[in-house]
């Protein structure tokens, strides 16, 4: 022990900090009373590493009561700040045993000493430390009280048992507290994420220095006074608070759009603050602040000023604002109709399209003026505007609108023709008798044939097609227009009776791939596999084969797998790849075995795709087949094989990969081999 004493004493006198750090580390080897003077010396060292080591040693020195007694006076240290702070850390490290002695000297300490004692109590989770900190909240020394508020929150954060009492103490002391102390209390509550009654925040909201806390708390309540506070803050406050209040209120209105009581309160608050519209409009036009714009855009809708509708509409096409803008227009309601109609007649096509697309959000039944605007939009020079009008008429149109829409199903622009078909179908279901009347005398060779097919498809789901309708669709299958033939297939596919299936088989011989594919899908859903098989076996089109196999799968997965197994031997690489792609969708043993069979295909693209679909071998025979691919002259195949083997955790796969490294010359394959070997994948038993 004497040797240890002498060693520590000598080391603490050295100029080299590392020597003194070693001394601090060796303090635990000394008797407590011998170690304490050296401990204090180390705690007050000029080097932080020495102080940190001494702090760690303090709890390990016995007897601890003597150590604590020596550390307590350090709380009054005025000269050596390092010693003072290190003593605090040492007492915290010692823990609960230090609480009693610290509390015993608390009353006698200076203001600075008390703050240091508070730091000690903050670091120890104990009911005594929490109680002492709660008591210190009521001290006359505001600096100590503020430190106690922060410390109490830290202690309560670590203990559910102490949390409720701490929150109550923080709230209780806000009554009559000055601004500085109130901020500390509020920060403590914020740190604890405490649920505090709105009344507490309502009281402090009149203080400009504290209003920000009330604004944040207003997000968690629907109390009318909170809503009024947010509106008045937007109307009369600093830029920072105006922004925060706008975001909070905007989100509350957005989430509560169906709460008429909430909306009424906010509108009443707007009426009491006539200057509120200016800051909201300013934020709605601030392009570099998305959260503020989002909140302000919603509030513009609630304000209902027609002059601001263009600003709301402008937000429709911006990422992150579309939903807010739509909600704002809904809130604006009738106030937005006039500006929308005006915008629908503006020069900018995108603005016209946006204005038209939003009409259903605002008006449930189209007025004469709205209908006039929509009908005019159908003749617009912009296809974007036409498509928007058609989408609106799908929900607001009437029986007469079908006659306007039908010619547009054959429009040269695919956006317009698709929108016209999508609008005509629901109208035909809604006004079935009128729709049948419109198509009853349509010439299958005329420009309305496409529209007639759309109408017949729409109503076919309600009842079987009449013989006249079937004859029309059968004739449409012979049309010179591929578009008409494609739509005829869709209409026939709704109710695939035996008579319909005979007609659909005509589509398998169509010169247009889309018609063939649509016919195969319809026959597949009807469970007719044989004509599809015949078509696929004679096809030389990879996409057609893939679509046919998918159609077959609707009849029977077993049939699709069996046919794909035949096609993987095709010399046509596109056909074989389509078969491999189909097999890769299934997990049963038959499909997996066929994928391994594809590894023998002469085309490298087929082999590489099969290796990708296999993912990883699972047996010795499968590993052998994948390993055979490593002798391919195609480096792409070798890379795919290495990748598949690398995904297999079995040690044999890794041995195959490792052996390949000696013979491989391609840099990219070598890189993949090294990556696999470095991946660390191991099976039981290792390598």
Image (cartoon, helix red, strand yellow):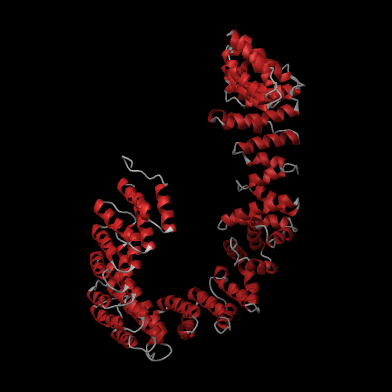
- The location of residue 161, given as percent across then percent down, is 54, 28
In the picture, measured across the screen, residue 234 lies left or right of residue 648, that is: right
Front-most of 537 and 253?
537
Give the farthest residue toward the right. 79
Q: In this view, does 492 lie above or below 128?
A: below
In the picture, measured across the screen, residue 26 lies left or right of residue 657, that is: right
Residue at left offset 63%, top offset 39%:
190
- The location of residue 38, given as percent across then percent down, is 66, 15
Q: Is residue 637 visible in this depiction of the protein?
A: yes
Front-most of 400 and 133?
133
Front-most of 7 and 130?
7
> Residue 452 falls in which quadrant of the image?
bottom left
Residue at left offset 67%, top offset 41%:
201
> Residue 151 falls in which quadrant of the image?
top right
Q: Is residue 393 above or below residue 280?
A: below
- The location of residue 217, given as percent across then percent down, is 64, 44
Q: Is residue 461 visible in this depiction of the protein?
A: no
Q: In this view, does 253 lie above or below 132?
A: below
Classify the position of the C terminus by image quarter: top left
């Amino acid at each position: 022990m004497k040797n240890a004493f002498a060693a520590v004493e000598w080391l603490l006198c050295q100029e080299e900090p590392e020597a003194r750090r070693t001394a601090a580390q060796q303090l635990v080897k000394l008797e407590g009373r011998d170690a304490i003077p050296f401990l204090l010396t180390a705690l007050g060292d000029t080097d932080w590493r020495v102080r940190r080591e001494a702090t760690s040693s303090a709890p390990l020195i016995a007897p601890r009561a003597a150590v604590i007694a020596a550390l307590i006076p350090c709380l009054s240290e005025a000269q050596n700040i390092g010693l003072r702070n290190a003593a605090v850390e040492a007492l915290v490290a010692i823990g609960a045993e230090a609480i009693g002695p610290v509390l015993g000297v608390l009353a006698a300490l200076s203001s600075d000493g008390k703050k240091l004692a508070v730091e000690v109590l903050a670091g120890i989770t104990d009911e005594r430390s929490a109680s002492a900190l709660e008591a210190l909240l009521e001290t006359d020394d505001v600096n100590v009280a503020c430190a106690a508020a922060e410390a109490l929150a830290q202690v309560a954060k670590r203990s559910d048992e102490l949390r409720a009492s701490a929150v109550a103490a923080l709230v209780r002391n806000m009554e009559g507290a000055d601004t500085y102390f109130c901020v500390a209390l509020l920060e403590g509550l914020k740190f604890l994420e405490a649920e505090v009654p709105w009344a507490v925040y309502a009281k402090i909201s009149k203080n400009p220095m504290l209003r920000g806390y009330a604004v944040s708390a207003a997000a968690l309540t629907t109390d009318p006074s909170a809503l009024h506070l947010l509106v008045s803050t937007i109307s009369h406050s600093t830029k920072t608070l105006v922004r925060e209040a706008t975001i909070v209120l905007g989100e509350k209105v957005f989430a509560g759009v169906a709460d008429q009581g909430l909306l009424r309160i906010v509108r009443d608050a707007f009426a009491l603050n006539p200057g509120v519209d200016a800051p909201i409009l300013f934020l709605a036009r601030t392009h570099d602040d998305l959260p503020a714009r989002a909140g302000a855009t919603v509030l513009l809708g609630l304000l209902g000023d027609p002059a601001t509708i263009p600003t709301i509409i402008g937000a429709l096409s911006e990422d992150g604002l579309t939903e807010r803008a739509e909600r704002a227009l809904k809130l604006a309601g009738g106030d937005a109709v006039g500006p929308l109609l005006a915008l629908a007649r503006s020069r900018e096509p995108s603005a016209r399209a946006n204005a038209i697309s939003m009409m259903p959000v605002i008006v449930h039944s189209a007025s004469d003026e709205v209908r006039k605007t929509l009908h005019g939009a159908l003749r617009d020079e912009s296809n974007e505007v036409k498509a928007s009008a058609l989408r609106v008429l799908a929900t607001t149109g009437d029986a007469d609108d079908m006659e306007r829409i039908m010619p547009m199903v054959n429009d040269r622009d695919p956006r317009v023709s698709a929108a016209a078909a999508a609008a005509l179908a629901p109208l035909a279901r809604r006004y079935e008798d009128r729709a049948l009347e419109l198509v009853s005398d349509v010439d299958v060779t005329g420009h309305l044939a496409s529209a007639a097919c759309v109408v017949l498809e729409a109503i076919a789901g309600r009842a079987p097609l009449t013989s006249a309708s079937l004859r029309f669709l059968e004739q449409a299958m012979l049309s010179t227009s591929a578009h008409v033939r494609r739509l005829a297939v869709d209409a026939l596919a709704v109710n695939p009776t035996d008579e319909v299936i005979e007609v659909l088989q005509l589509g398998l011989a169509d010169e247009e791939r889309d018609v063939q594919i649509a016919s195969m899908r319809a026959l597949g859903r009807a469970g007719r596999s044989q004509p599809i098989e015949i078509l696929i076996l004679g096809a030389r089109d990879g996409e057609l084969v893939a679509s046919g196999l998918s159609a077959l799968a609707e009849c029977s997965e077993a049939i699709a797998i069996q046919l794909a197994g035949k096609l993987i031997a095709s010399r046509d690489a596109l056909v074989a790849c389509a078969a491999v792609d189909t097999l890769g969708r299934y997990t049963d043993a038959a499909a997996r075995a066929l994928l391994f069979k594809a590894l023998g295909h002469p085309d490298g693209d087929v082999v590489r795709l099969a290796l990708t679909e296999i993912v990883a071998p699972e047996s010795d025979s499968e590993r052998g087949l994948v390993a055979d691919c490593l002798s391919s002259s195609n480096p792409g195949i070798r890379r795919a094989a290495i990748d598949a083997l690398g995904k297999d955790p079995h040690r044999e796969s890794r041995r195959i990969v490792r052996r390949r490294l000696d013979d491989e010359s391609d840099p990219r394959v070598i890189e993949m081999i090294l990556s696999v070997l470095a991946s660390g994948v191991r099976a039981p038993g290792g390598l």
